[in-house]
Image (spheres, coloured by chain):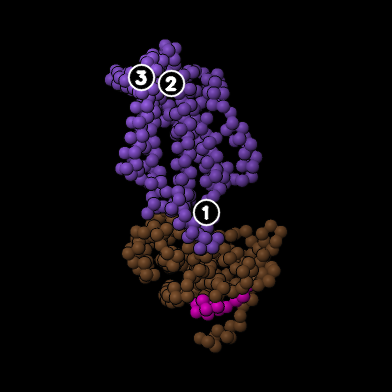
Amino acid sequence: MIALDLTAKSFGATQVLGPMRLRVEPGEVLGISGPSGAGKSTLLRILAGIDRRFEGMLDAPGRRAMVFQSPTLMPWRRVIDNVTIPTGATTAEAAEILARVGLAGLERRWPGQLSLGQARRVGIARAFVGRPDLLILDEPFASLDAERIEDLLALTAALIAETRPAVVLASHAEHELATLATRRARLDGRPARLIEAQRERVRAGS
Amino acid sequence: MSSVARTGLAQTARKGAAPKPPSLRGMFRALISLAVLVLLWAGLSALLADPLRAPGPQQVLPALFQGVVSGEILLDLSATLRRVGLSFVLAMATGTAAGIVLGLMPRLDRWLDPWLTVFNTIPALVTIVLCYLWIGLNESAAIAAVALNKVPLVTLMLREGVRVLDPDLAAMAQVYRMGPLARLRHIVLPQLAPHLVSAARAGLALIWKIVLVVEFLGRSDGIGFRLHLDFQMFDITGVLANALAFVAVMLALEALLIAPLAARAARWRTQ
């Protein structure tokens, strides 16, 4: 489980995030929407442990993974090494997950030789290979065409169902949120606050 | 940064900066070009018909051959190369460490930046003379003088490299909890590699110009010392023979040592 009790997050004199409480259980997917610049990425960076300069308490599990807005691969390491080096996974495990995300045969390529869609798949393989307890998805399907997003959504949903991490997903796309999220929240205002959607609606749907 | 911009960046890097492996045609062209230079030199010297003051390749090449066979030039070359090697390693290590520290600590950097500008502006000759005066006319002074001339340049280039390190990759390493050694090896050094190669190249070019002056002024072996003797004997053929041997060795060093290292560091861009 991940738990965040945030009092405030500021950059210099500007307070970006206001007080908020956030809990996500294993297997749950919290989908966060909100206007650009509301602070979604800032919130995700706090949850992922990248940004530690905030007022409040974060209780997050050790095995974390994140899929970034840009694929964020090491261009000087081959595809398979991009999966094994950050995560400590074995070559066999990496090859297996790469095949799972549809990149069999491309293990020895350099990231610069991949399309954006393929690079995003490497990012997803890297995130799931270590069976994380906490998975942060920050606009993981940005700038892909609709058909590819559909494939990746199905793949991501299947991998989440198998590995059951606590997931926090930030996205602009209603369709992505509706497909993956088990709970919904909206980040808005200045400083931004997190407004959880009514749980009844989700429960009624499931 | 948007993902589209990122892939665009990667592609331009791939097209632009990658050094091409030398093609057979390119090497052939370089050989022809050098042959033409030697011919021009021979022609000019024949035209002037003054072998004492304007020796042609027909005088210089035998002198060079003589020097190599007698072992004299090889002895001086090895003395000079040892100084080049030691001061190169010293300057790269010091400059890289200083550059990384300044790149990581912007506040310190703002204070020390004017110092760098001053040290970078001090003429090489001043450093050399001061080293000989302070340390004495010995080998340590010679190596320190050469190295000190190069340190500010390496520092500047590495500081720039650290400044442009990708924050997204640093965040990735943090999320996945990569250890400090793994980060250095897989995240930081690959990004610094092009800067290290440029610093090595520029530094070597600087060092082999300065090392001769250092030897000329205060050593009793090395190519610079030999040039000093030739200078006093008004032996222009000797000057040119020594210079030729030196240039050949330095070009070989660049082609056989630095170029392959640079190509290896840029491997991922060329494919």
In which quarter of the view is residue A49 placed?
Answer: bottom right
Mark 3: amino acid: Ala
* Residue B166 image label: 1
Chain B representation colour: purple
Residue A74 placement (x, y as % from top left)? 44, 56
User: How many angstroms separate mark 1 from mark 2 (CA)?
Assistant: 44 Å
Q: Is residue B73 visible?
A: no
Give the crowd class for mark 1: few <14, some 14-19, many >=20 residues within 10 Å: few
Give residue A115's quadrant in the image.
Answer: bottom left
Is A185 magenta? The answer is yes
Query: Label 3 to label 2, Cα distance in Å?
Result: 28 Å
In this view, the residue in front, B155 or B54, is: B54
Which of A192 and B71 lies nearest the eye of the viewer?
B71
The residue that disc 3 covers is B46
Q: Is residue B52 above or below residue B166?
A: above
Q: Which label sits in the foreground, 3 or 1?
A: 3
Chain A colour as displayed: brown
Q: Secondary structure at mark 3?
A: helix
Q: Is residue B237 left or right of residue A169?
A: left
In the figure, residue B155 lies in which quadrant? top right
Segment tinted magenta in the rendering: A174-187
- Chain of the residue that carries numbered disc 3 in the rendered image: B
